[in-house]
Each structure stands twice: as structure tokens, then as C-alpha cells.
Image: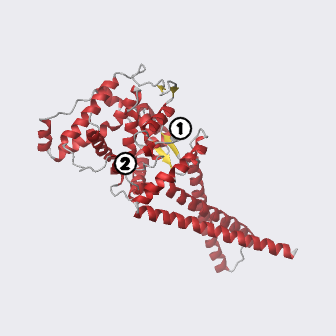
Amino acid sequence: MRMLQEGQRMDKRKLFRKSRLLFAAMAAAAVALNAAAWNSSAFADWYIAHIFPFWVNTYGRITGLFPISVGEWLIGAGLVLVGMAALLGIAWAGIGAVRAVRHILRRGSRKRAVCAFGRFSRGFYRFFAWVLVSVCLVMTLNCFILYHASTFSEQYFGDDDNVYALEELIGVYNMVAEQCNSLSYAMERDESGMVLYQGSIGRDGELLDMEDMARELMAQLGEDYPQLAGYYPRPKALATSDFMCQQYMQGYYFPFSMEANYNDVMHILNFPSTMCHELAHLRGYIYEDEANFIGYLACVQSDDAFFRYAGYLSVLVYLNNDIYKARKENESVYEKALETIRPVAVEPQVWTDNVFVVQEEWDRINGKALIDTEVVDKAADVFIDTNLKLNGISDGAVSYSRVVKLLLQYYRYHPV
């Protein structure tokens, strides 16, 4: 009996040593991969071309079998684990304080209860450490490396002097504005003027819903841009879309579940470009400006007027804001540009359609919100800005407006 127990102890020690080695290997791999990506865009490019698609084609297909957002539920589970870790820490702080008082008063302690709690705590924190190192490795493989790859512009637009005249900016803006004006009249609407969507006709002539149409358009874009070719899972609506609205977030790519998720409470005309934007992340384009541009490009190539209108709307404000900035920075240059080309007036209906969330939904969301929307929005801004800067994007959330530069590059190579 004693020999059997001794053998079991030895087996446990061997298993423990092996688990420690595996843990160390996973942590070392996360560090090494991040170091390699930070120091070599060639490594990041190779990884995206040869390894990253494997995760989409395997893990992404598995999570795609679930109708709900797996990533959303994993975040919920993660928050529970963090909460438990904090509570256990508080409990041990309390136990320490009680022990100190008992020691001073020279009273005994309930060792059995404390020992049992200690065993549970050790087991929990060991599990928590495994979850933490796994998340770090998965985030490295499916997110962090991607930040250091060659950009879409470097891959497909070649050498560019990055110098654009204000007239070029106004020219692209006018094209987008004219398309928006024209397409706004082509939309089917209900009695209140809200745009309706009845489905899209795919390349094979079948009726597709919005999710499958987004997948088809992204795959179609892959014919011109090889990195975008391949399998795409169906985008999924988020159960916590109300909370996403409070963050002013249209969608989210979950690296640990390889899913493209969208906010289904926002205005319907935001859906197409958001779906394509999040799917772009699944092809290795992690920068927000690039995903914005790819989402735009996928939508405007469609034969479906609804998708085209949504695509043009998705960049209208970016272009409008940059023209406003140009005018504010140098009034004389702006006035000189007007001698050649003047900005097109945008129809009131277009601005009405170009809304994040309709007022009725905002009233509902704010009426039941546990946390004030302004607080949530500020916290989300800090998180996004910090995450971008930690991954080497020095201007943080400002990178979202770089989509204008990509539009200018694209239309320089593809004149309207």
C-alpha cells in the first residue's frame, strides 16, 4: 500500500514538472513571437500568409457552427474568473488580518478550514494562470503579430509619394457624395422613412441574407487582392449590442474565437460595411483604417444598391471632416482649390441616413443602462487608444481617419 502511494506521488510530481515545462514553453513562445514580429515585418507577413489562415479554417469553422458569438461568452467567462480571483485575494487578505489578530491575542486558528480553503485557492490560481498564458498566446497568434505586417497600401499600391492636392480630396469626396445622393433615392423605405432590406442576389442568382452577401463580397474582393481570398465565417450579431452602442462600437473581431461580430442595434445601413470590416480582420488586416477601407471596397463593388449605399456612407464623414480640417488649417489654399473644384452638396436624406443609432433606440438604451453612456464611451476610448499604442500605432485611435489616405491612393490608381 505504501509503495502504491509512493508511486502515485512520483507520478503526480512528473505530471507537475511536465505541466510547468509546458506552461513555460507557452509563455516563452508568446514572448518570442511578439519579439520576432516587432523586429521583422517579413516574419509577420510570412506568418499571415502561411500560418494565420490555418486558425481561420479550423478554429474559425468550429466556432462558426454556433449561432451565438462564442467570443462574447468567453469574455463573460473571463470576467467571472477575474472577479473570483479578486474575491479570493480579498478573502486571503482577511484571513491574514485575522491570523495577525489571533497571534497577538495568542489564540488558536481554525487550521483545517484554512487548509481546505488554501488547497482550493491554489488550484484556482493555478487554473487562472493557465487561462492567462493561453489568452496571451492566442492573442499573440491571432492579433498582436498582425500589427507588424506590411500594410495594405505597401502590398497593393506600391511606391507612393503620399502627397495629395486638396483638389484630389474634394474630387473623391464629390464622387462619394454624388453616389450617396443618387442611391438614397433608390432605397426601399417604410412609412417612417427607415431603409428596408429584403435580401441580396448572389453571383449564382440565389437570394442571400446580409451576412452571406458580406461573405461573398469579401471572397470576390480576394480575386483582386490575394490576401483577402479564402474562407469567411458568417458574421454574428452581439447579444450585448446595447452595451456596444454605449461604447459607440459598430463591431468587434474576437481573436480568441476567430469571429466577426456586429452590433445589431445600430442603424441598418451600418451593417454591411461593419460586417466586411470585421471579416477583413480575419484575413490579417488588423489596422482599423485598412479594415474600414476594405469594408468600403467590398460594399461598393456590389451590384446591390443597399450595399453600395452603405459602403459610400461609411466613408462620407471621414472625407467631409478632412475637407473641413484642410479649410481650417489653410483658408487660402482651400479658396484656391475652389477655383478648380467645389464640394458637392449632400442631400438632407443622406445625412438622416448617416446615423449610428436612431433616437428611439438611444432612449431605450439609456433608460435601462446600469452605467452612464458617457462613462462607458470614455472608458472604451481609453482602452482602444491604449491597445493601439501598445501595438505600435503611435497615434492611437486617430488611425481610424487614415482611411481617407487609402481612398486617395486607391482612386489615384483607379481613376473614377
| In this rendering, the label closer to the viewer, 2 or 1 | 2
Residue ID at (45%, 33%): 361
Question: Which residue is denoted by mark 2 in the rendering?
Answer: 152
Q: Residue at x 57, y 58 (%)?
A: 82
How crowded is the residue under tag 1: few (<14 C-alpha within 10 Å), some, or many (20+)? many
Element type where label 1 sits in the image:
loop
Please determine whether, in this image, residue 145 is positioned above or below residue 239.
below
Q: For this rendering, which residue is in front, 257 or 73? A: 257
Q: Quadrant of the N terminus?
A: bottom right
- Residue plotted at (51% across, 52% down): 52
Q: Amino acid under label 2?
A: Phe
Q: The residue tagged with tag 2: helix, strand or loop?
A: helix
**Which amino acid, mark 1?**
Arg
**Mark 1 = which residue?**
234
Marks 2 and 1, how far apart at CA: 23 Å
Q: Which mark is residue 262?
A: none
- The picture places residue 230, in percent across and down from the top left corner, at 50, 42
Q: Are marks 2 and 1 in contact (CB under 8 Å)?
A: no
Sequence-wise, which precedes: disc 2 or disc 1?
A: 2
Residue sitting nearer the eye, 287 or 252: 287
Query: What x and y, as percent, mark residue 348?
Result: 29, 27
Nearer-the-camera pick, 211 or 353: 211
